[in-house]
Amino acid sequence: MEDIRFCPKHGFYRGELCSCGFKGEIVLRKEKVERLGKFVSGVLRHFPQKFDLEIDENGWVNFESLVKVVEKKYRWASRWILKALVYSDVKKRYELRDDKIRARYGHSIDVKLSDMPEATEDSLYYSTSEEEASRLLEIGIKPVNQSYVHLSTNFEKSIEVAALRSKKPIILEIDAKKSREDGIKILKANDFIALAKEVPAKYIKKVIQYSSSV
């Protein structure tokens, strides 16, 4: 986790220097970035009702309503701080549109996200353990503790995800083109993540065993 800073030319960013080389003033220290991020993600992905926030079928809540919840939780937080969290997030966890905000992915609550664009990649990737791979080849990939299966849009990103799960991960290559042709809807959450309600086993076209030592 890194500090959030502000560049007059490029806005909020994380880390010491902006992409232009400018060292901006600190907006929020990394300890508070982590605390605020976990709280906001939790509210938008898992328990909006706990704070009486109305959430629509596409995951949107009123931004000002969330600001009030955040300000009540943390005295140091504000509308500006919340926007800093959103706009500086390189993983693009959140989307702020007009007077609404949502998490782009990671929901455990039931959301449709039907206003998201569809993924256009021919292949998508899912990382898993060696033990789990054989089972997925039989039954397909289904969400676990989340509303959607989260797929990587490129092989390199899937390796990053895989490294968090296993020392010898298995990367499953998904025939996204064929699944779309067969009517399966896959959503594009951001540049690196696509979402599917499930991936039937017949669309797993390749199994790649990856080792960091290779």
Image: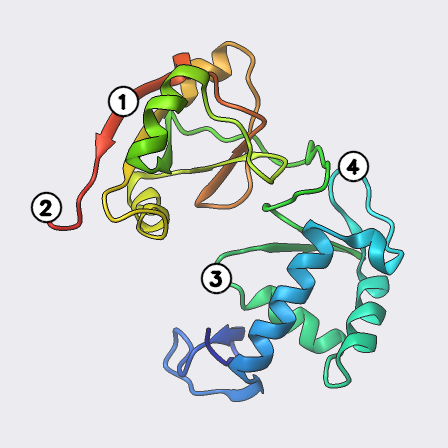
Where disc 2 sits, the SS reads: loop
Question: Considering only order in the chain, which callout, 2 or 4, is on the residue closer to the N terminus?
Answer: 4
- Estimate the x, y position of residue 8 in percent, counting from the top left: 55, 82
Q: Is residue 8 above or below residue 103?
A: below
Spatial CA distance of label 4 from label 1 is 34 Å
Q: Is residue 38 above or below residue 44?
A: below
Where disc 1 sits, the SS reads: strand
Where disc 3 sits, the SS reads: loop
Outermost residue to the bottom: 25
Q: Nearer the viewer, residue 4 or 34?
A: 34
Question: Considering only order in the chain, which callout, 3 or 4, is on the residue closer to the N terminus?
Answer: 4
Which of discs 4 and 3 lies nearer the camera? The answer is 4
Q: Residue at x 68, y 36 (%)?
A: 113
Near mark 3 (Cα within 10 A), the count class, few <14, some 14-19 or many ≥20, is few
Q: Nearer the viewer, residue 19 or 56?
A: 56
Near mark 1 (Cα within 10 A), the count class, few <14, some 14-19 or many ≥20, is few
Residue at which label 4 appears: 57
Q: Is residue 8 visible?
A: no
Near mark 4 (Cα within 10 A), the count class, few <14, some 14-19 or many ≥20, is few
Question: Considering only order in the chain, which callout, 2 or 1, is on the residue closer to the N terminus?
Answer: 1
Where disc 4 sits, the SS reads: loop
Q: Residue at x 60, y 40 (%)?
A: 145
Image quadrant where residue 93 sits: bottom right
Residue at which label 2 appears: 214
Q: Which mark is residue 206?
A: 1
Residue at which label 3 appears: 90
Question: Considering only order in the chain, which callout, 1 or 3, is on the residue closer to the N terminus?
Answer: 3
